[in-house]
Amino acid sequence: MITGLDHIVLVCPDIEAGISAYEALLGRSPDWRASSDGTATALFRVENTALELLAPDGRSEMATRLRAILDERGPGLTSLAFSCSDIEATHHKLARRGLNPDAVSRGASTGSDTGETRTWKRFRCDDKAMAGIKTFIIEPDAILPPTAPPNSSVSKLDHIVVATPNPDRALGLYGAKLGLDLALDRTREEWKTRFLFFRTGGLTFEIIHRLDMQHDVTGPDTIWGLTWAVDDIDAAHARLDGAGLEISDLRDGRKPGSKVFTVKNGTLDVPTLFISHTPR
């Protein structure tokens, strides 16, 4: 049914500033740029997904509405778009599972630099049924391949972190309804957190529930942060340090054999970690 995560949407105030920030962060240029209907987009594709920057463009009603949202909330991760190979069958299945999808529609984007057109079919699940996260299912007519990066650049998304006030609801939503593979359900008292790990398309959804906080179990889930994988974490650390970003020292990750560092600025307010699973 769902084959992976096609892309994540990051809303930002200015597309050029957003591109500049993520070129520096990821060590790669956008693979696609487009502008239409009051929005400008830039797509950074890696091995297993893509990050789509979305910014207001011009003075249309859509651009004005998007600027108002940014004025209220600031930049941030807003949407998930899962990929599938048969959108009609997936729509039927998710409707029966109570995600209340809207109708399947066709979409298209014409590249600003190339003049080429990409097309897809998609539908949106009901926000309430998805615990407040805007969720789309997409079947692209063709996959935009990533460019080969240097070793210091991001190669793929290791995992995406979603915070939930209701882990049992998340178990049902991501496991039973979306059909992602549940790989771990573990509570770590020393970190005061319950972790749910779901896997799809070569990346992990890490659902976290803080045990030391009061929660409204009916409240929304939120897309919290991203962990990017690199082949050479020493080179990546040196590259970001040379670019003037504020970063932590390298340290051992929670997974044996991993090394990580935190990026503290230049992410458009997205909590960001870099990780390497290759021994240095």
Image (spheres, helix red, strand yellow):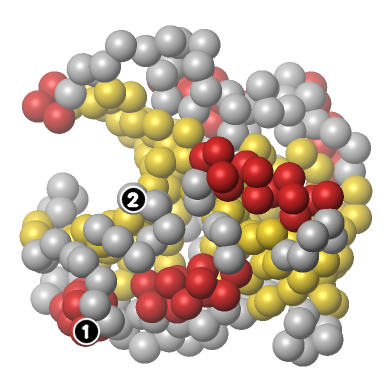
Image quarter of the C terminus: bottom left
- Does the image show residue 173? yes
Q: Secondary structure at mark 2?
A: loop
Rounded to the nearest angstrom, the CA distance separating label 2 from label 1 is 20 Å
Q: Residue placed at 76% from the left, 39% from the top?
A: 124
Classify residue 43 by image quadrant.
bottom right
Q: Residues within 10 Å of mark 2 (few under 14, many from 20)?
A: some
Three-letter amino acid code at the position of disc 1: Gly
Mark 2, residue position? 271
Q: Position of residue 151 (x, y in %)?
A: 31, 85
Q: Quadrant of the N terminus?
A: top right
The reply to whether discs 2 and 1 touch (Cβ–Cβ < 8 Å) is no
Residue situated in front as seen by the camera: 175 or 149:
149
Q: Secondary structure at mark 1?
A: helix
Query: Mark 2 is on which residue type?
Result: Pro
Q: As rendered, which of 202 and 236 lies closer to the eye?
A: 236
| Residue in front for this viewpoint, 119 or 69 | 69
Residue positioned 9% across, 65% down in the render: 249
Q: Which mark is residue 242?
A: 1
User: In the shown orientation, is residue 130 left or right of residue 85?
Assistant: left
As drawn, 10 above or below 27: above
Q: Residues within 10 Å of mark 1 (few under 14, many from 20)?
A: few
For the point 37% across and 72% down, the residue is 25
- Residue 139 in the figure: left or right of residue 27: right
Q: Tell me where residue 148 appears, x and y as whole percent.
A: 48, 86
Where does residue 251 sit, x and y in percent of width and height?
9, 60
Residue 242 pos. (x, y %): 21, 84
Q: Quadrant of residue 237?
A: bottom left
Is 50 above or below relative to 2?
below
